[in-house]
Image (cartoon, rainbow, N blue to C red):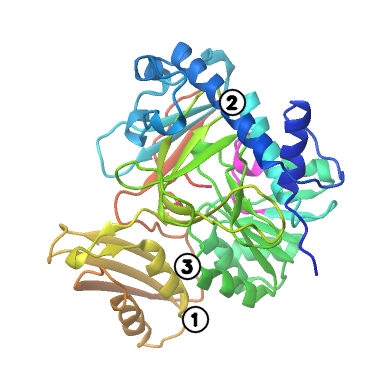
Amino acid sequence: MSIPITPLDAWIARRLEDGTPGVGYSAETLRPVDRKTLAAAQERALRVLVRHAAANAPFYRERLRGLEDAPLRELPFTFPSDLAGAESRFLTVSQSEIRRVVTLATSGTTAPPKRLCFTDEDLEATEEFFLHGMVTFTPPGSAVAVLMGGTRPDGIGALLKRGLRRLGCSVHVFPLGEPPAATAARLDEVRPSVVVGLPAQVAAAAELSHHAPRVALLSGDMAPPSLRRRIEARWGCRVFVHYGLTESGWGCAVECAAREGCHVRELDLLPEIVDENGNVLPQGEWGEVTLTTLTRRSFPLLRYRSGDEGRFLPECCSCGSVLRRVEVRGRLPRRGAGGHLLRLYDAEEVLWRLPQVRDFALSLSGGKDRHETLLLELVVSGEDGDIAAKAVHALRALPGIPPHIVVTQHFGPVPERPGPKRSWGDACVLTEDRSGRRIPPSPSPHPRGGRS
């Protein structure tokens, strides 16, 4: 059975041919992207972006002086700390043109929050990507449940709803962070064929819902294989993964029918994988995901260091697309006990393998020495007293785990609260305001607040 090429190909190929943003969806014959043509278009867009940023963004004015024609890898990096309290230095348009402002406030620090600004054009571009990415597993007229909703008209749920309406889909946006039992009841009532949500949130709902969707799209957090298998086993569905972050305009890369890595929206984003010293790594090697926003000129980001660990998959996708595919584990690893790299992704993988585990929170306390302690909060089903011991045993097998592990255990079918934060370091919270007004932070179900 042949695997259909990702619909992103036709979208990008059409834009390469006629120079339009590809607004709207048509069920045209899918045609592959020409890699040489795409690379040339990326280079032209990069040159335009660099000159535009140097002329109009105060942050880049001095940094890019004399580098207007320099290759990508010679351009300076942009770090998350550069955005803290400095959004006006990145803006190249009037405040009156800003449609949405998103604040990413880092908890536990005194640093000012990061704020990112989006125009109507920026939001429409994300809406277009959501639409064409969802076509892979969302036939026209489908019922879709989005568990990443909110009351704001330009949130992720609203963008998905507007885009999928063009396919004649009925889209139901659920409140973000509601108890799993309430989400499961909504799913049983709506009976969607496609569910979009945070991985742990979808897993918790799957434990309680009677209705089983045909497809689940996981976004906004790590989705290790063990969690994907759990959802697939419970619902008998196919699970897909999306990777994105607020800085990329939410949409970044999504799996095709082959499910062999996430295809990047390469005409809008220019990704790189770099090591800790900023050296560009070859395909297949793990490093930090770095992004350049080629077409978001209102708030340009050049070589933005995301803090996420990922790699490009070197071989060609089974669907036949030449679009780059990225595989992302999650936040960059840190040095743990004995100097070994400690990955939150690995801890998630082993904990989700335990069938009694329904949710958990992980954090580290103390310094990076022998006094460091791993704090594990478990939500489990049943009264099996060995679950905590099994969890500790599984974690002990991982490199870098500190010698001290403290476990707090709660019993119940699923947690009746938003999913706990998972982070080795500072967690992030997300607040937003159309006018740019700062809203006091609140606990976030995201490990870093910015991913989508």
Label 1 CA crowd tier, 10 Å (few <14, some 14–19, many 20+): few
Label 3 CA crowd tier, 10 Å (few <14, some 14–19, many 20+): many
Residue 202 seen anywhere in this rendered image of the structure: yes
Q: CA distance from mark 1 to mark 2?
A: 48 Å
Above or below, 374 against 286 in this view is below
- Residue 428 numbered tag: none
The majority secondary structure of the magenta stretch comes to loop
Q: Which residue is mark 2?
A: 45
Q: CA distance from mark 2 to mark 3?
A: 47 Å
Amino acid on which disc 1 is placed: Pro
Counting every numbered tag in the picture gives 3
Amino acid on which disc 3 is placed: Pro
The range drawn in magenta is 146-159
Left or right: 190 in relation to 330: right
Residue 179 seen anywhere in this rendered image of the structure: no
Amino acid on which disc 2 is placed: Ala
Q: Secondary structure at mark 2?
A: helix
Q: Secondary structure at mark 3?
A: loop
Residue 152 magenta = yes
- Residue 355 numbered tag: 1
